[in-house]
């Protein structure tokens, strides 16, 4: 007997881009992180902060540990956190939620996404996402047995923008769910009200639900860009589940405290699935995140984080430009996408494997976020994602190394 994944899991792995030549490969993220570790290159691939979250929030978790918050919390999450999420949504966006029935605490946004897709879709349904997309989306859509369809974000002078004609064409009578993400990983786009209105109009006309991943809601970096939750658009609160998380907002990505909010019937369905995925998690972290969502000092810390990320983005965008790449200035998130076409490079995977040798840095090929063979996959074949959620001195060193990028060797990479 050989240890082999089931046919169903192979299908999931294939949809998630994990099967290469019929065998299960490690993710490109793991490959690039291992490459960074092996070569001593600076890892601008995976997006996690290299500094800690607010000390007061860490202290609140330590206090909760000592105070005995160490057993299973309630299934839907502790009341204080559900109330803090509801208060946050009302204060910030004018969205009224019943913390008893319309808010559910999850093991990070990741579990909320998985449970929502599993609860709301199945074989015969189509789930429409933007493309490129966060890599977990393809996997959970495949786990649900649904079909993944996409609408492209296209680079231009105003950043990555949603192709509205392609969006309309991507909707069918089988579109059950639109899985949206703004601010958007990996492009850094913050969807405009007009883009969201186009999605909302189509979702209503096709009677589709919307699940919106807003984990970067507080990390908008452009004065002109505003985060607009889909649930605030006319007619959308009744068909939208909103997902967020403490990981990106508080630079505490290891805590995995997320939440989902929306109509009670939809939240109920998600809770039923979540019950049998993790049941509950993060007992001592839940009171700490409840504190974080209500404390004005933490809100100021988050605003400072966004301002600091905007500066760090500018440093990396300039460094990439000086190295001969063509970055698209992101409006939010941790990430910038860059086109190496000016260097004559046409294959992002080959470039990423060579980057430690060429410049002593590591990025992730954008094809890790596309569907093999799609129009976006072709258009962004050469592109690379870099993160700027690193300390100033790390970014300064990355920029110094990028300035020495070996252009002749880059140009000679096999196309
Ligand atoms: C990081 C990230 C997540 C995962 O959030 P967790 O709370 O760590 O599970 C989900 N969606 C996007 C777009 C992300 O970048």
Image (spheres, grey):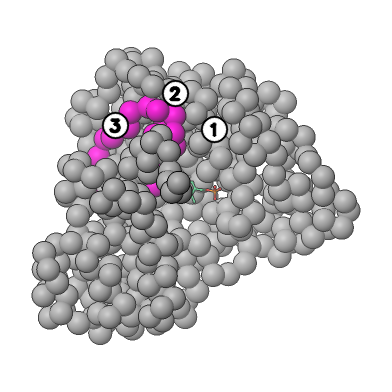
Quadrant assignment, res 397: bottom left
Q: Residue furthest right?
A: 67
Residue at x 15%, y 79% (from the top left corner): 409
Q: Which residues are magenta?
A: 135-156
Residue 39 is situated, as x and y percent measured from the top left of the image, at: 38, 80
Mark 2 / mark 1, whichever is N-terminal: 1
Classify mark 2: helix, strand or loop.
Answer: loop
Classify mark 3: helix, strand or loop.
Answer: strand
Q: Is residue 321 magenta?
A: no
- Figure check: 193 above or below 133: above
Query: Residue tagged by mark 2?
Result: 121
Could one spot residue 314 in this view of the protein? Answer: no
Query: Residue 77 got which mark?
Result: none
Mark 2 / mark 3, whichever is N-terminal: 2
Residue at x 33%, y 42% (from the top left corner): 14
Classify mark 1: helix, strand or loop.
Answer: helix
Residue 399 is situated, as x and y percent measured from the top left of the image, at: 34, 78
């Amino acid at each position: 007997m050989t240890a082999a994944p089931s046919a169903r899991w192979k299908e999931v792995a294939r949809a998630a881009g994990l099967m290469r030549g019929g065998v299960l490969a490690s993710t490109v993220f793991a490959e690039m992180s291992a490459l960074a570790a092996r070569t001593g290159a600076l890892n601008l691939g995976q997006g996690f902060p290299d500094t800690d979250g607010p000390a007061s929030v860490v202290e609140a978790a330590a206090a909760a540990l000592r105070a005995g918050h160490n057993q299973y919390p309630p299934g839907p999450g502790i009341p204080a956190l559900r109330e803090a999420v509801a208060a946050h949504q009302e204060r910030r966006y004018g969205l009224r939620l019943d913390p008893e029935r319309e808010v559910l605490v999850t093991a990070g946004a990741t579990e909320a996404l998985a449970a929502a897709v599993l609860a709301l879709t199945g074989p015969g349904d189509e789930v429409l996402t933007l493309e490129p997309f966060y890599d977990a989306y393809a996997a959970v859509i495949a786990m649900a047995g649904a079909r993944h369809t996409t609408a492209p974000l296209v680079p231009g002078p105003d950043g990555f923008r949603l192709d509205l004609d392609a969006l309309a064409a991507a909707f069918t009578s089988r579109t059950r769910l639109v899985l949206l993400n703004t601010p958007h990983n990996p492009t850094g786009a913050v969807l405009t009200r007009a883009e969201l209105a186009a999605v909302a109009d189509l979702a209503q006309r096709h009677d589709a639900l919307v699940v919106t991943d807003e984990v970067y809601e507080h990390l908008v970096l452009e004065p002109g860009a505003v985060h607009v939750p889909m649930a605030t658009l006319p007619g959308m609160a009744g068909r939208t589940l909103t997902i967020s998380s403490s990981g990106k907002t508080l630079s505490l990505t290891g805590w995995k405290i997320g939440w989902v909010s929306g109509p009670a019937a939809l939240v109920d369905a998600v809770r039923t699935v979540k019950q049998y995925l993790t049941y509950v998690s993060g007992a001592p972290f839940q009171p700490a995140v409840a504190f974080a969502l209500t404390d004005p000092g933490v809100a100021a810390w988050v605003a400072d984080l966004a301002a600091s990320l905007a500066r760090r983005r500018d440093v990396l965008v300039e460094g990439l430009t000086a190295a001969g790449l063509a970055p698209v200035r992101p409006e939010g998130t941790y990430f910038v996408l860059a086109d190496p076409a000016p260097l004559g490079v046409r294959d992002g995977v080959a470039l990423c494997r060579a980057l430690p040798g060429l410049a002593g840095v590591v990025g992730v090929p954008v094809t890790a976020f596309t569907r093999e063979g799609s129009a976006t996959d072709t258009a962004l074949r050469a592109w690379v994602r870099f993160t700027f959620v690193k300390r100033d001195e790390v970014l300064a060193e990355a920029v110094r190394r990028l300035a020495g990028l070996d252009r002749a060797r880059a140009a000679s990479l096999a196309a």
